[in-house]
Image (cartoon, rainbow, N blue to C red):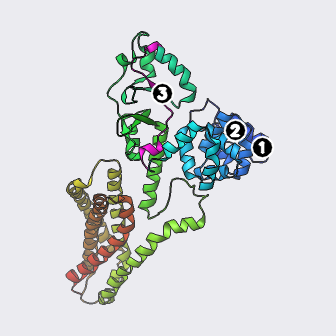
Amino acid sequence: MKRQPAARPSTSQEVAPGSNGALRHLCEKSHPAAAAEALSALEPKAVWEVLRDIDPVLRTEIFSHLEPNLQVDMVGTLPRADMARLLSDMPPDDRADLFRRLPEESRDAVLPALAEAEREDIRRLTNYEDGTAGAVMTSDYATLSPDLTVAAAIERLREVAPDKETIYYSYVVDDDRRLLGFVSLKDLILARRDATVRDIMHEDVISAKTSDDQEDAARIIQKYDLIALPIVNEEGALVGIITHDDAIDIITQEHTEDMHRFMAITGSTGTDGYLRTSVWKHVQHRVGWLVGLGALGLVSGIIIHEFEATLTQVIILALYMPMVADTGGNTGSQSATVVVRALALREISPRDVWRVLFKELQVSVFLAAVLGILAWAKVMWLSQGVEIPPGFSLGNIARVISLALAMQVVTATLIGALLPLTAARLKLDPAVVASPALTTIVDITGLLIYFFTARWLLGV
């Protein structure tokens, strides 16, 4: 978690990196996030030259706002003593996240230079599986005994406050650190000084387990408007908290990953910025699905070849093939998008498949009627004067194209809804499966619908 800094005037001013003194002044007068943005244009060694001599608390705040890959590059350039000093000043969860990303040689170099308590904290936090609540929690939280008086509890919080990420929530635990309840700072201030913590604590604690998915934990914070979420182990003992700002980071990361996967981009998406990602990595992230779907797209060519005689007899059909294919892709993508979002927000689950398909069927019928009529009008208007083969009429051809487009809208919408639901049922990522496969499948089904409709109504 990034500690809330003391109020500093925000700035959008860009400072040219000509002088370390000017950059240090910018760091001291700006919000840490703005300072980090300004420093991001520098090389890792130059960033440390600026940060090295400023206040340690401010240095840690600015460092925590730097992009993760820049943090790793910067730490890799430091002597062991400076590296240890920087990690010691960081909040436990940020320190553990950085330690996970460091290369093995850097980990081996820095661990012996840290205090024993910090080493154990790093080992414990990094022991949890990536993507779980335990991997993103912090061990920096305030606890109180249920038998303390309110006056004693306030005094204790005053003592520990400088070292805690938040003291607005204090968690009440027994001798075995089992979570009994919580009290807010407001509760303590308003209570009688001689009352006990047990008397005023809230026992209906919303919590998560260390093994829970990090996105589920973040959604709990979002749903219940929590400042922090306590994390317990299998025995019910309190081991950490996830704060609201970390929840925002988690949700942002998950949304970014879903967006990339929805557009057939693989690989890690949570740590590298766009400009700092090499061209080769961009290629690696994109090429896999494109090659596979390109090969599958050959089926479309085979279908067109099989119906070559139909196209030869009624060449006007070729003019409107892109319109039918594009419309199917657009309606299928809309359906897939709303279903993937609903799955991500836990509004629906795979067992709701029939309810979802029925709703999408109703939507698609209305869309098909509107788009089919517009397609008929478009053909009748734009194709005036186009040579029509003997035995056919423009009206019949317009009916074929509009009916095929309407059928394509319905099938594409249902396919767009069914693919992510099927992926979720098979425990796959709906975003990965839905969009990359959708376009190719809809193209294939659209061509089949188009040509079979032409054969049926035109007899070609």
The residue mark sitting in front, 1 or 3, is: 3
Rendered view: 392 above or below 212: below
Q: Is residue 279 found inside the magenta-colored segment of the image?
A: no
Find disc 3 in the rendering and name its residue.
142
Q: Mark 2, mark 3: which one is toward the viewer?
A: 3
Q: CA distance from mark 2 to mark 1?
A: 10 Å
Give the answer, above or below, for where 100 lies relative to 157: below
Q: Amino acid at mark 1?
A: Asn
Quarter containing the C terminus:
bottom left
Our reading of the magenta stretch's main secondary structure is loop
Mark toward the start of the polypeptide (2 vs 1) = 1
Element carrying mark 2: helix
Q: Is residue 137 magenta?
A: yes
Q: Residue at x 31, y 77 (%)?
A: 447
Question: Mark 2 belongs to which amino acid?
Answer: Cys
Q: Nearer the viewer, residue 9 or 402?
A: 9
Q: CA distance from mark 2 to mark 3?
A: 30 Å
Amino acid type shown at disc 3: Ala
Residue 407, picture quadrant: bottom left
Viewer-proximal residue, 362 or 204?
A: 204
User: Helix, strand or loop at disc 3?
Assistant: loop
Name the residue that disc number 2 marks.
27
CB-based contact (under 8 Å), mark 2 and mark 3: no
The part of the chain drawn in magenta is: 130-151
Residue 382 on image: x %, y %: 37, 75
Where does the image place residue 442, in percent across and percent down from the top left? Answer: 33, 70
Contact between labelled residues 3 and 1, with CB atoms less than 8 Å apart = no
In the displayed structure image, the side of residue 356 where residue 165 appears, left or right: right
Task: Write down the residue under mark 1.
Answer: 20
Q: Of marks 2 and 3, which one's residue comes earlier in the chain?
A: 2
Mark 3: few, some, or many residues within 10 Å (few <14, many ≥20)?
many
